[in-house]
Amino acid sequence: METTVEKSVEVLNDLIEINNDRIDGFTRASKDLGEGDVDLKAVFDKFASDSRQNVQELSAAVGALGGDLETGNTVTGTIHRAWLDVKATFSGQDRKAILDECERGEDAIKKAYQEALSADSGLSAQHIELVSRQQQVINEGHDSIKALRDAQA
């Protein structure tokens, strides 16, 4: 039977993995942009930086619990990045296509944070506060990507 600490470590590690996916996804998307997309590169770099900060905070929380730290990516994230690569190849660095795929990634991380904050996640009040604060930044990022994508229509 899983203890509360083990469950918390698992939830926090899941968030580390999906933040790693987000870092990799925005880094890849930034590379796929053309020279005229300096504005998006700045946005993508900021979101990757936000997720690096999230990973540092989550890693510290896992360490404080005495848990083993995950440093990889999720299987879904790997698929997401591969799809981004394929789309970029076919779209010829199309801004809207890249933003569409970035929004899909933002939907995934937004869902992961919602699940982490569910009543059965087992997180302590301290970890709920950390995850809630990060969730606010994630939600703002999602909304920004959606607005940028919608502006391309």
Image: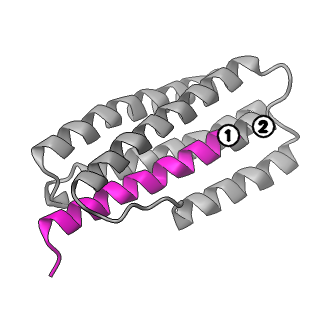
Label at residue 87: none
The x, y position of residue 43, in whole percent, is 61, 24
Q: What residue does disc 1 label?
A: 27
- Magenta-colored stretch includes residue 11: yes
> Which residue is farthest bottom?
1
Instruction: Reply yes or no: does residue 42 show up in magenta.
Output: no
Task: Check contact, mark 1 vs mark 2: CB within 8 A.
Answer: yes
Q: In this rendered view, identify the residue nearer to me: 58 or 149.
A: 58
Question: Which residue is the site of mark 2?
Answer: 31
Q: Secondary structure at mark 2?
A: helix
Identify residue type, mark 1.
Thr
Q: In screen coordinates, is 25 left or right of 17?
A: right
Q: Position of residue 82 (x, y in %)?
A: 71, 59
- The x and y percentages for residue 25 are 63, 46
Which quadrant does the N terminus fall into? Answer: bottom left
Amino acid tagged 2: Lys
Residue 39 in the image: above or below residue 101: above
Give the magenta part as a residue range: 1-27
Q: Is residue 79 above or below residue 61?
A: below
State the residue at coordinates (46%, 56%).
17
Instruction: Report whether residue 153 is seen.
Output: no
| Magenta stretch: dominant secondary structure | helix
